[in-house]
Amino acid sequence: MAGTMMHEYIHAYFDWNLYLMKSGATTYDANFEKTYKLLFDESGVPLNDGFGANQHEQIATSFVKEIAAMLKIYAANQNIPLPADPLYFEKIGWGGLQYTSLYKYAPEGTTYANSAEAGNNSTTITQTIKCKKL
Ligand SMILES: [Zn+2]
């Protein structure tokens, strides 16, 4: 759940900065285009990413380890015992990225889906915030 929230938050972060750029605002993050190159073509124009494929490639490139690290800290702060699987948090970080080119580098046994994007029958709030997917 926390992993899904992080994933969706990153989409929101991307979308917000792209929105600011497209609307001519200058208040988007200074290094946004330079940092998240996979969201732009070679001339610097934001790619048409209606299905979120480029955002997922960018998340796979830039955020899997960060999501894992954040979850580990979160678990520690909540006094949640560390799971036996040392790659548990990294596997969660790969959630929702199964269609990316980098997914082949996910740890073996990564099966955790991003519940917001799996379109599952969960009755949690994630059911109503499905994000863009392939
Ligand atoms: Zn996503």
Image (spheres, helix red, strand yellow):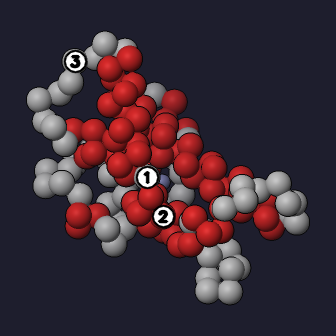
Q: Is mark 2 within 8 Å of ligand 1?
A: no
The residue wearing badge 1 is 63
Tell me the SS state at disc 2. helix
Q: Left of 48 or right of it: where is 113?
A: left
Q: Residue 69: horizontal and vertical position, in percent?
A: 36, 38
Looking at the rendering, which quadrant does residue 102 occupy?
Answer: bottom left
Q: Residue at x 57, y 64 (%)?
A: 35
Residue type, mark 1 in image: Phe
The residue wearing badge 2 is 58
One can see residue 134 in this view: no
The residue wearing badge 3 is 81
Contact check, label 1 and label 3, Cβ < 8 Å: no
The label on residue 76 is none
Residue type, mark 2 in image: Gln
Q: Left of 26 or right of it: where is 48?
A: left
Looking at the rendering, which quadrant does residue 30 occupy?
Answer: bottom right
Q: CA distance from mark 2 to mark 3?
A: 31 Å
Q: Among all residues in the image, which is located at the extreme bottom?
A: 43
Q: Residues within 10 Å of mark 1 (few under 14, many from 20)?
A: some
Q: Residue at x 31, y 13 (%)?
A: 79
